[in-house]
Image (cartoon, coloured by chain):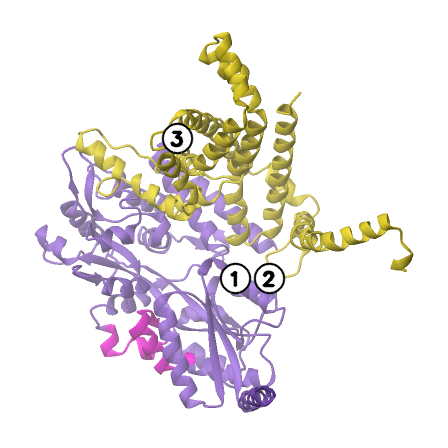
Chain colours: A yellow, B purple
């Protein structure tokens, strides 16, 4: 049978033979669980017993749950603060680092180091920084100058930015590297032409560098948005005693899902939250891709 | 070369044959618990003793981090993979029974009447008709740990006996720096640790209330007694001057361990980790009484049960193992290694144990302890945490915050029992 196929058909058979493995892999570990999660979101299940149909009950509960709306808001605060801050910071660092020759490699390594550090270890070190006197680093410094201490994590207003700061810092190294690669990819002839024309640095930046960096910016925005929408490890580790606290001030959606599933054992409700997160991620990514698509 | 290969194959065959032979004559059962250093050590000792007495039975212990425990058990047993004997929190029993993950203990080996008579009464929550579903090796209760050096430094001659004395002692041991920041707390506080148990079963009852009615299905602490209990509690860190701070040194037990806290309320399971702390001179006393001399405590326990996976000779072996780990001998080993209290008065209330400087206060506390029946322990604790945070961070009146917590907890209980 195989012998009777044309060369083109044989090529297709071979292509699919090789593709079968990743396709199977994705089906089993990505598509099947995704489908299953959507299914569970319409059921009640406590992990131990049998699953029973719940209809839209879980979604109704979600809609009426004030904690969910608080968490929903937090998730977007993480996104709307985290993405622009890290984008601007990483661009400024990359832009200047690119011009620097002295100790260039060493500095780049310093910026990249946090990205390689385990998020758990980093979160615990920052958690210690933020403690009150007598152990917290920041507050001990403040107290040394006789300044009243600041409640970093024990505050409904300060806690979220305090948790976000190390998360931004941790992702910075990666974004700096990507930006630098983007900057290097811009042909120098454009800059030479600008130099000959006697154009100022600001015009060069806004007319040459930024437009040509567009693909890099799209990539970083999408990548870091998804990261901030899925933020979990920093929050969880900095607030383990009271996950997402105080008063849910730092709780992101992923942490709520974890808590509902593995402390409350309400898998149906957790799955409904997961479906909502999935939808948000999908919509945000699609919008960003469309907005930032090159003309 | 060929003969080499032959020899290898032959050797492999004989060794695997030997393996199978030994496996055939012995029963191997599996025991699962969550990972906590001292508990694993204690169980290793128990298993070694049991295997010595029953050479034909091998017990393999597997342990997991607490966070994954329930998920793994739930996934493994229906698949026929999991443990034959499993350890679970008393509050989870209903879920396990309903999901048919565990089977009742045989009434001839574990007669209900005998267990009723021999074990502390709180164990009866595990009984269903004439059979017990599960039994604990050990139980836990709360007590007041105190730092002897700080007590002495503050000029106090002994640990406090009443709540008023406790507040006075805490005030005497609190230290602040020039800026007014607390650098040493008189007593630790934090609903995230054991304080929510102390508040529910201790302070509320000591103020004349009853935290729950209707077999813990109806919240009853939204009362004058509840408000008084909550005001007493929040007064510790909101009073003038405060004698503690929430989140001081991150965790209450860390502050006490570091010698920066005068007193600390915690469970008997903390003994093991404090005992190894160099330079910390600590003592322990019963939870303080109210002005009428009334004391109240909280107790909880982990139970062992036989799963539905155990059948035939594995079942027989599991019953034998259960018999051993609920024996007097096992309880004494558990007390010595883990610091958790024997589940039988006959072992716990021996002259030696009840008067022990360290275990005594916990064991005496069992006599006036109540066991909260949780539907979702971490969820119910979280409500207590938030109840205090609303007062501390948002300036809400205690009565108002208490009412919100009571309503939310009632909703949680209703949802759980509706299923």
Q: Is residue A245 visible?
A: no
Query: Magenta stretch: residue A255 in it?
Result: no
Q: Are marks 2 and 1 in contact (CB under 8 Å)?
A: yes
Judge the density around disc 2: few (<14), some (14-19), many (≥20) Cα neighbours within 10 Å. many
- Residue A276, image x, y percentages: 62, 39
Q: Quadrant of residue A58?
A: top right
Could you tell me which quadrant the C terminus of chain A lies in? top right
* Depth order, front residue of B81/B140: B81
Asked if disc 2 and disc 3 are in contact, CB closer than 8 Å, the reply is no
- Circle 1 Cα neighbour tier, 10 Å, few/some/many (<14 / 14–19 / ≥20): many
Q: Secondary structure at mark 1?
A: helix
Q: CA distance from mark 2 to mark 3?
A: 39 Å
Q: Work out whether residue A115 or residue B105 is closer to the camera in this orientation and state it.
A: A115
Find residue B218 and report its horizontal and vertical position in percent: 49, 52
Q: Residue at x 60, y 44 (%)?
A: A274
The residue sitting at 90% across, 60% down in the picture is A1
Residue B90 picture location, percent across and down: 46, 65
User: Is the residue at mark 2 from the same chain as the one at mark 1?
Assistant: no
**Toward which corner of the image does residue A25 lie, by quadrant?**
bottom right
Magenta span of residues? B325-354
Which is nearer the eye, A281 or A107? A107
Alpha carbons under labels 2 and 1: distance apart: 9 Å
* Residue B24, position as x, y percentages in the image: 57, 89
> Which residue is identified by label 2?
A48
Report the residue marked by disc 3. Answer: A157
């Amino acid at each position: 049978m195989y012998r009777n196929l044309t060369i083109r058909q044989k090529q297709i058979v071979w292509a699919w033979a090789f593709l079968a493995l990743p396709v199977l892999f994705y089906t089993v570990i990505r598509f099947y669980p995704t489908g299953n999660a959507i299914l569970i979101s319409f059921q009640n299940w406590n992990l131990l017993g049998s699953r029973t149909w719940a209809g839209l009950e879980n979604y109704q509960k979600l809609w009426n749950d004030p904690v969910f709306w608080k968490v929903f808001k937090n998730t977007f605060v993480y996104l709307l603060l985290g993405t622009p801050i890290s984008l601007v910071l990483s661009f400024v660092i990359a832009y200047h680092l690119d011009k620097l020759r002295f100790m260039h490699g060493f500095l780049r390594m310093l910026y990249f180091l946090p990205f390689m550090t385990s998020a758990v270890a980093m979160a615990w070190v920052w958690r210690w920084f933020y403690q009150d006197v007598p152990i917290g680093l920041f507050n001990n410094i403040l107290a040394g100058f006789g300044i009243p201490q600041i409640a970093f994590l024990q505050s409904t207003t300060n806690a979220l930015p305090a948790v976000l700061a190390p998360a931004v810092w941790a992702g910075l190294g990666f974004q700096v590297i990507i930006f630098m690669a983007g900057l290097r990819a811009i042909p120098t002839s454009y800059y030479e032409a600008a130099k000959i024309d006697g154009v100022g640095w600001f015009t060069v930046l806004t007319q040459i560098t930024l437009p040509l960096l567009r693909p890099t910016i799209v990539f970083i925005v999408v990548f870091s948005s998804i990261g901030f929408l899925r933020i979990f490890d920093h929050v969880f580790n900095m607030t383990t005693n009271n996950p997402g606290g105080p008063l849910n001030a730092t709780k992101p959606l992923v942490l709520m899902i974890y808590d509902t599933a593995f402390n409350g054992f309400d898998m149906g409700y957790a799955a409904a939250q997961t479906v909502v997160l999935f939808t948000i991620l999908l919509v945000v990514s699609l919008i960003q891709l469309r907005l930032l698509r090159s003309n | 070369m060929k003969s080499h290969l032959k020899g290898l194959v032959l050797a492999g065959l004989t060794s695997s044959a030997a393996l199978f032979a030994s496996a055939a004559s012995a029963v191997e059962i599996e025991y699962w618990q969550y990972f906590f250093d001292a508990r694993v050590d204690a169980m290793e000792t128990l298993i070694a003793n049991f295997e010595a007495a029953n050479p034909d039975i091998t017990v393999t212990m597997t342990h997991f981090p607490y966070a994954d425990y329930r998920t793994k058990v739930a996934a493994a047993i229906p698949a026929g993979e999991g443990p034959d004997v499993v350890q679970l929190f008393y509050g989870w029993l209903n879920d396990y029974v309903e999901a048919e993950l565990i089977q009742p203990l045989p009434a001839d080996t574990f007669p209900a009447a005998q267990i009723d008579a021999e074990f502390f009464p709180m164990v009866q929550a595990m009984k269903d008709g004439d059979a017990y579903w599960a039994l604990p090796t050990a139980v836990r209760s709360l007590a007041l740990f105190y730092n002897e050096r700080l007590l002495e430094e503050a000029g106090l001659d002994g640990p406090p006996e009443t709540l008023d004395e406790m507040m006075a002692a805490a005030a005497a041991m609190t230290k602040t720096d020039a800026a007014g920041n607390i650098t040493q707390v008189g007593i630790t506080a934090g609903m995230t640790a054991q304080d929510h148990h102390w508040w529910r079963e201790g302070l509320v009852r000591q103020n004349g209330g009853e935290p729950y009615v209707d077999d813990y299905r109806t919240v009853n602490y939204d009362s004058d007694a509840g408000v008084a209990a909550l005001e007493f509690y929040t007064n510790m860190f909101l009073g003038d001057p405060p004698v503690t701070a929430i989140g001081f040194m991150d965790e209450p037990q860390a502050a006490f361990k570091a010698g920066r806290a005068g007193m600390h309320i915690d469970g008997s399971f903390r003994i093991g980790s404090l005992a190894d702390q160099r330079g910390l001179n600590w003592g322990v006393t019963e939870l303080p009484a109210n002005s009428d001399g009334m004391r109240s405590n909280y107790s909880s326990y982990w139970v062992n049960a036989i799963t539905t996976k155990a059948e035939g000779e594995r079942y027989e072996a599991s019953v034998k193992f259960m018999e051993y780990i609920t024996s007097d001998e096992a309880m004494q080993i558990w007390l010595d290694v883990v610091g958790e209290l024997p589940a039988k008065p006959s072992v716990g209330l021996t002259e030696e144990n009840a008067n022990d400087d360290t275990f005594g206060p916990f064991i005496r506390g069992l006599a006036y302890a109540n066991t909260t029946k949780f539907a979702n322990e971490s969820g119910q604790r979280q409500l207590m945490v938030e109840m205090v945070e609303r007062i501390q961070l948002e300036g809400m009146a205690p009565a108002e915050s208490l009412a919100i917590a009571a309503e939310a907890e009632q909703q949680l209980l209703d949802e759980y029992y509706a299923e």
